[in-house]
Amino acid sequence: TETETRNHHDGKQQNGGATAEASTVEDVFDDAYKEKEGPKPPRMLVWRNIILMSLLHIGALYGLVLIPNASTSTLAFTAVCYMFSALGVTAGAHRLWSHRSYKATLPLRVFLALGNSMAFQNDIYEWARDHRVHHKYSETDADPHNATRGFFFAHVGWLLVRKHPDVIEKGKKLELSDLKADKVVMFQRRHYKLSVVILCFLVPTLVPWYFWGESLLVAYFIPGLLRYTVMLNATWLVNSAAHIWGNRPYDKTINPRENSLVALSAIGEGFHNYHHTFPFDYASSEFGIKLNVTTAFIDLMCALGLAKDRKRVLKETIAARRLRTGDGGYKSG
Ligand code: ST9
Ligand code: ZN
Ligand code: ZN
């Protein structure tokens, strides 16, 4: 099968994060942490974010209304921007930089960092730091988008309030030296604002205008704001929907779930019960490239010699884990 072939190709297999390399990444759930007793700290709204997020979503709705006015080239370009920015998050910030599930050469890391700036989801360093605390302290006070606080909080609410102090306290103790040592990550962090202005807003607006005479209005609102907003919501659904709805074939004791609809919009990142069980697996799913453009992209990069050392879980390990802690449901993608 596909999985076996790929395992074979990689010539490097893992059986549950047991190798030294995997254990240096702090994405493994820590059950020693206990939430502090007593009343929770008060919720502090960040009005600047609430206003900007509302305006962004209103702008995206206007972009939706403008679709009949857009040329075919502009709509195709919107799809390209969506894929590029999504890969900067999935193949970049997530599978490469947060989980170190494969290795990437400098040109590929530059490509992913550019896509990541187009995605405008905080710089790679901050994204990976928040994501490692999300895995390590999943669904506790120290999880930035703790899904036990409800759909809205896990989806976008967490970006509209001050963080729980435990997120920062635990986050500061994480091992992040691999990120600090990556020149691409630190360069993007130093020039983050400028890179976002150029890649998330100027490029999507100016390219259709300059190359095929699209109106600036349509270009700003469709490949710009609408593309950005849809991509944000697809990402957030992994934190909200895929922590609430779906099966748990690998570990029924945790909340993250297998959700094919989320996987589709998030180009492969909806197999979330699998992902929290085996966070170092480069495919983020038992089933390889199925509904998983990101995995296909990483495979292509390996074929081109731009990436290597994909980590994968052994089939036997997955089967044993299903039996030991799964919910018995098979459907998964
Ligand atoms: C966005 C991110 O949308 C989305 C991430 C989603 C993650 C999804 C994961 C799911 C799996 C992968 C699926 C991918 C699917 C992709 C599909 C694509 C189609 N550790 O933050 P501050 C410290 S962003 C350690 O201001 P406040 C630190 O010293 C959208 N330390 O806290 C920091 O300073 P610095 C656009 C930490 O004041 C200082 O505290 N962006 C940690 O509570 C202050 O930090 C926005 O909307 C930590 N974890 O404010 C902006 N955290 O950073 C949103 C903090 O200099 N952010 N520290 O080191 C904010 O405005 C604020 O962060 C805040 C909290 C208001 C939310
Ligand atoms: Zn999660
Ligand atoms: Zn993850």
Image: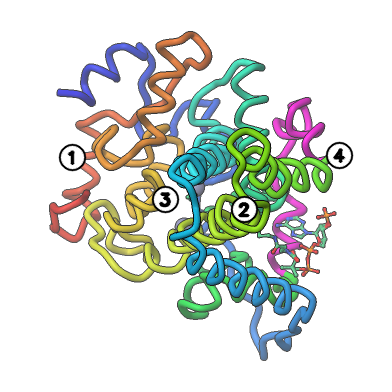
The mark nearer the N terminus, 4 or 2, is 4
Q: Quadrant of the N terminus?
A: top left
The mark nearer the N terminus, 1 or 3, is 3
Q: Position of residue 300 (x, y in %)?
A: 40, 19
Name which residue lies at 48% across and 72% down: 147
- SS under mark 4: helix
Which of discs 3 and 2 lies nearer the camera? The answer is 2
Q: Position of residue 227 (x, y in %)?
A: 54, 54
Amino acid bearing label 3 = Ala
Amino acid bearing label 1 = Ala
Which residue occupies the foreground of this view, 3 or 20?
3
In the image, which disc is placed on residue 190?
A: 4
Name which residue lies at 57% across and 35% down: 92
Q: Specify the principal SS of the magenta part.
A: helix
In the image, which disc is placed on residue 319?
A: 1
Name which residue lies at 63% across and 51% down: 215
